[in-house]
Amino acid sequence: MTAILTDIEGTTSSISFVKDVLFPYAASHLPGFVRQHARRDDVAELIEAIQVSESLTDIDAVVDQCMAWMEADNKQTQLKALQGLIWKTGYEQGDYEAHVYEDAYRYIRQWHQAGIPVYIYSSGSVYAQKLFFRYSCFGDMTDLFSGFFDTTTGPKLEADSYVTISAAIGKPPAGIVFLSDVLGELDAAHAAGMATVHVQREKGMSSGEIHRVAHSFAEIQPD
Ligand SMILES: [Mg+2]
């Protein structure tokens, strides 16, 4: 094994932290955040981009549009960026810290120390991924990772994305082990030639035929 590539939600971390903490936090804070920081350069730029693309004239309409996108789980680019800024504020204020399973923390640190590079591939933006691990329940973990990939590299269900990532890492796919809780992602990584481990945090998850199964990172052998 020359490198590890891992998903976050359901793999290094509980699905419920993102679903029950982060997303509701962004939804409840977005209206106030957008109105309060509308003149801040980074926020103003995002508001303007949404106004242009959706033909909206005022801030209230932008807020309504963002709320509708969140309701529909639409991962619109500027919305994702706004959510990232809101989450940053929440992390900095100590409103929450990112959940990481203890075994994931322990083994990621161990692999890193053993010289096995660990990379992240998640549907959350790289910006949000770095915040997540900077403010984890085990402290700042960002130094344990050699790189971060999001869906700007490609969709997680397409084999090409994994080919692109292995090229970016600079190692052949066969030397990379991809960890995820989602079979479709594992199938895509397998099709690209990566080794795959189906991380099953919940009891009773169905296993495919082709992926190794681990219930904790302790069961993942680095060879
Ligand atoms: Mg996942």
Image (cartoon, helix red, strand yellow):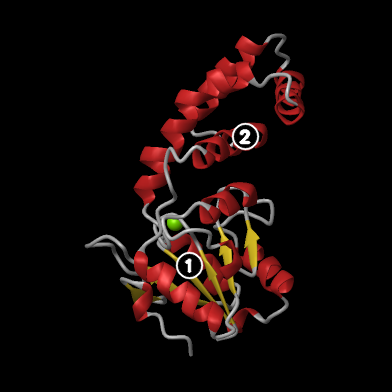
Q: Can you say whether 23 is above or below 158 in the image?
A: above
Upstream in sequence: badge 2 or badge 1: 2
Q: Where 8 falls versus 164 (above or below)? A: above
Per the image, the residue denoted by label 2 is 76
| Alpha carbon distance from label 2 to label 1 | 25 Å
Contact flag, marks 2 and 1 (Cβ < 8 Å)? no
Q: Is residue 204 left or right of residue 8?
A: left
Q: Residue at x 52, y 22 (%)?
A: 67
Q: Is residue 45 left or right of residue 211?
A: right
Nearer the observer, 176 or 30: 30
The residue positioned farthest toward the bottom in the image shown: 223
Residue 131 percent location from the top left of the image: 57, 49
- Say which residue label 1 marks: 186
Image quadrant holding the N terminus, namely: bottom right
SS type, badge 2: loop
Left or right: 130 with respect to 22? right
Residue 142, quarter of the rendered image: bottom right
* In this view, the mark in front (2 or 1): 2
Closer-to-camera residue (110/153): 110
Residue at point 58%, 17% (across, down): 63
Which amino acid, by three-letter code, is at mark 2?
Gln
Dot 2, crowdedness within 10 Å: few (<14), some or many (≥20)?
Answer: few
Residue 133 in the image, given as x and y percentages of width and height = 52, 56
Q: Position of residue 151 (x, y in %)?
A: 63, 52
The residue located at (61%, 36%) in the rendering is 85
Q: Quadrant of ligand 1?
A: bottom left
Q: Is residue 93 visible?
A: yes
Crowd rating for badge 1 (residues with CA inside 10 Å; few <14, some 14–19, many 20+)? many
Q: Amino acid at mark 1?
A: Leu
